[in-house]
Image (tube, rainbow, N blue to C red):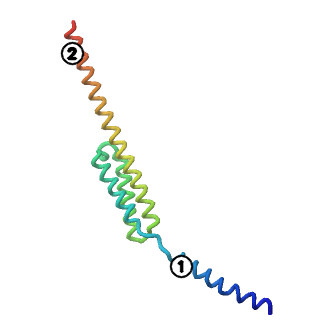
Amino acid sequence: MKNSSSYKWYRPISVIGCAAVVIVGCASIPPPTEQIAVAKSALASAASAGGNEFASVEMSAAQEKLDRAHQAMEKEDYENARWLAEQAQADARLAEKKAQSAKAQKAASVIQDDIRVLREEINRKSK
């Protein structure tokens, strides 16, 4: 009889444990709408910074991952959609920084050319 009475104590605990597992298992990952919006914004910022011109590979990768994130959202694969949106955001930010860097290098080159022209002008006038 001792065994059956001790079993009675485990029974409610096991039922509660199973219910907790079912509840946790049913809890779904929320749709990553914020991450997708941030990725879209990052892509737009990169485009306005000249990403399409100076970092086309990164821009294409960001757009492709954002498109895949939308597809994952339609399939309610929210974990994959979140991951893809975060990757798209990272690619877009890289594209933006590469574009900014390329523009800065281009501006520095123009300034160096202007300095060279000014020096030549000074040298001609001093002779």
**Residue 118 drawn at (x, y percent):** 23, 19
In which quadrant is the C terminus drawn? Answer: top left
Q: Which residue is mark 1?
A: 23
Give coordinates of residue 83: x percent, y percent.
45, 60
User: Where does the image place residue 25, in percent across and percent down from the top left?
Assistant: 54, 76
Q: How many marks?
A: 2
Quickly name the residue at label 2: 121
Q: Residues within 10 Å of mark 1 (few under 14, many from 20)?
A: few
Give the numbered dot on residue 119.
Answer: none
Farthest-out residue, bottom: 1
Q: Quadrant of residue 105?
A: top left
Mark 2 element type: helix
Instruction: Tell me the residue at 41%/71% (across/down).
Output: 75
Snapshot quadrant of residue 39: bottom left
Residues at marks 1 and 2 touching, judged by CB atoms closer than 8 Å: no
Q: Please state which of the two labelled residues, at mark 1 or mark 2, is closer to the viewer.
A: 1
Mark pair 1, 2: CA separation: 80 Å
Q: Mark 1 belongs to which amino acid?
A: Ile
For residue 50, above or below residue 123: below
Query: Could you tell whether 7 is left or right of 123 in the image?
Result: right
